[in-house]
Image (tube, grey):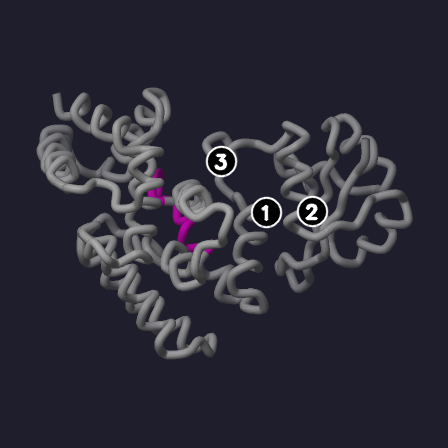
């Protein structure tokens, strides 16, 4: 039983914040927070946000300092982590940890992307989807890490989302080109990220295009979920298009499902086919029926 604290890396309100968790119980976490004078409003479902100025005092009080990735593993291992589908929608802790693994030192860009993925009109194409795509890439490439260009393309692939097929992907690709060039990435990497983002408009990568196959499979991995997960996905997609009447939405959605069923292959990596293809085709066929 212990309370853990990661480094103050999260920028907000003119300072930086750490995250405080317990590896055993929320009761232990709340008791520690009360004793340290941390207000209840700093609690965010499974952790406390604490300002950088408190870091040394919390360590002196018994919090164990660990790296961000270790803290996330401790939280998952405790069973206290709130799954992505049940979170309040912030997901800042797991997303910040992942961002710092792919492009550390670019806090302003991270915050901009986080704000974009958290826009109010997004229900499916929000932060939960972003995290799911990143986690799917982990599954597809384990035990290796996904290429940086593929990870950055995942971060940007729906960064602009207005619900306009083709235009959203093009605008997201242009955003990636602008922001990653400003961040100082080599031109070849910037071009590759933008190319991968544009690919997600059709999900038809060339057979020998490994990076595009990875991103396409991760983006479509939700199709291969269980019955309940797929039902939640459909409900969220309907909310994304709440401004469209039922008849028009049904017609448009049927066209999308037919297009997905026509993809051959639907998943482009051997691991993706193993994980999701059979369930995805069952789910899509059942939805169309």
Q: Is 122 covered by the magenta stretch?
A: yes
Disc 2 and disc 1: Cα gap in Å? Answer: 8 Å
Disc 2 and disc 3: Cα gap in Å? Answer: 17 Å
Asked whether residue 248 is in view, the answer is no
Q: Label 2 belongs to which residue? A: 19
Q: Residue at x 79, y 58 (%)?
A: 53
Left or right of 226 in this view: 92: right
Callout 2–callout 1 Cβ contact below 8 Å: yes
Disc 3 and disc 1: Cα gap in Å? Answer: 11 Å
Q: Label 3 belongs to which residue? A: 84
Q: Residue at x 66, y 51 (%)?
A: 68
List x then y, in percent, for residue 19.
69, 47
* Lower sequence index among marks 2 and 3: 2
Q: Label 1 belongs to which residue? A: 93
Stretch of the chain drawn in magenta: 114-125
Regarding mark 3 in the picture, which secondary structure is present there?
A: helix
How packed is label 2: few (under 14 Cα within 10 Å), some, or many (20 or more)? Answer: many
Snapshot quadrant of residue 207: bottom left
């Amino acid at each position: 039983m212990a309370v853990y604290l990661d480094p103050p890396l999260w920028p907000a309100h003119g300072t930086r914040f750490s995250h405080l968790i317990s590896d055993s119980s929320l009761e232990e976490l709340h008791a520690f927070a009360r004793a340290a004078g941390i207000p209840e409003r700093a609690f965010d479902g499974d952790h406390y946000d604490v300002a950088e100025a408190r870091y040394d005092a919390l360590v002196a009080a018994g919090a164990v300092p660990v790296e961000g990735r270790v803290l996330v593993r401790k939280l998952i291992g405790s069973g206290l982590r709130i799954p992505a589908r049940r979170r309040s929608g912030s997901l800042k802790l797991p997303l910040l940890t992942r961002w710092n693994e792919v492009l550390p030192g670019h806090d302003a860009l991270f915050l901009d992307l986080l704000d974009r993925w958290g826009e109010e009109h997004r229900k499916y194409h929000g932060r939960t989807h972003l995290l799911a795509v990143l986690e799917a890439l982990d599954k597809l490439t384990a035990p290796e890490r996904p290429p940086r260009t593929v990870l950055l393309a995942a971060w940007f692939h729906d960064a602009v989302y207005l619900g306009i097929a083709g235009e959203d992907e093009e605008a997201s690709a242009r955003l990636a080109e602008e922001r990653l060039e400003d961040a100082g990435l080599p031109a070849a990497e910037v071009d590759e990220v933008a190319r991968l983002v544009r690919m997600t408009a059709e999900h038809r990568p060339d057979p020998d295009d490994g990076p595009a196959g990875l991103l396409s499979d991760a983006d479509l991995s939700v199709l291969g979920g269980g019955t309940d997960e797929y039902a939640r996905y459909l409900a969220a997609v309907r909310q994304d298009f709440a401004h469209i009447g039922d008849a028009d939405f049904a017609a448009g959605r049927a066209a999308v499902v037919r297009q997905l069923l026509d993809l051959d292959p639907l998943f482009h990596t051997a691991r993706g086919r193993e994980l999701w293809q059979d369930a995805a085709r069952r789910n899509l066929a059942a939805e169309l029926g």
